[in-house]
Amino acid sequence: MKDSITISKEDYLKAVLEAECEGQTVISSLLAHWLSVSPPAVTMALKRLKRDGYVEVKADGIVRLTHKGRETAYRTARRHHLIERMLSEMFGMDWYRVHDEAERLEHALSPELEAVIAAKLGNPARDPHGDPIPTLDGRVEEPPARSLPALRPGERGILVRVSDADPDVLRQLTRLGIALGQEVEVLAEREAAGTLAVRVAGVTHALAASVAAAMQVEVDDEA
């Protein structure tokens, strides 16, 4: 079992990586929000990470991963996403539950068990939410996806990714019967203010803005 200091480092580095992947500007206040810790705790953690060569903190407060930090973040993210896929595919756990379980298990996974899980799953490229799983050599293949609200009325695409930042969003989609791999069409009309009207599998839904913003679709631009 790894010590708590190493676990803390992994949590911070993975949070920086995930924020970057979502296009966020990573600063200490963002990390405090993402990790549910106090600003002073983030300040102390960043000092240790900078001292140990995992991050750089620019004069404007923006945090960036060093090569060493990125390698560690990718390894942690790979274990996390593999565990999510395992819990979903092999144990039938709902996709809105797997994230928290993976957060607890990712630090205890040995390289040997990681390899066994990856092989058992057929070396998957995506987790249950559509997030790319880093390869062993640190490559990440992002899907050519667009945010659902960015589509014009009449445009359609295949749902390929949903943010797992808010489990309630995943629960709502589950209740509506919306899942990855389905075709989503943006409709011209709006059901109500602050919602996006879509058609999925022949059913019209009025999605809340927060739900629509969490969804990414792959659009065939040549269609």
Image: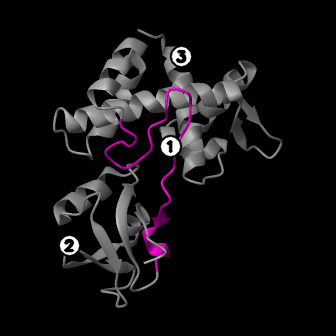
Residue bearing the label numbered 2: 201
Residue extending furthest toward the bottom: 189
Q: Nearer the viewer, residue 119 or 29?
A: 119
Residue bearing the label numbered 3: 6
Name the residue rendered at 31%, 50% in the picture: 167
Q: Nearer the viewer, residue 40 or 74?
A: 74
Q: Secondary structure at mark 2?
A: loop
Q: Secondary structure at mark 3?
A: helix
Q: CA distance from mark 3 to mark 1?
A: 18 Å
Q: Secondary structure at mark 1?
A: helix
Q: Earlier in the sequence, mark 3 or mark 1?
A: 3
Which quadrant holds residue 127? top left
Residue extending furthest toward the right: 59
State left or right for residue 66 relative to residue 163: right
Q: Nearer the viewer, residue 46 or 146?
A: 146
Name the residue rendered at 80%, 47% in the picture: 60
Residue range (magenta) = 124-151
Residue bearing the label numbered 1: 34
Instruction: Please tell me whether residue 185 is drawn above or below residue 15 in the rendered image.
Output: below
Identify residue type, mark 3. Answer: Thr
Image location (x, y in percent) of residue 136: 50, 26
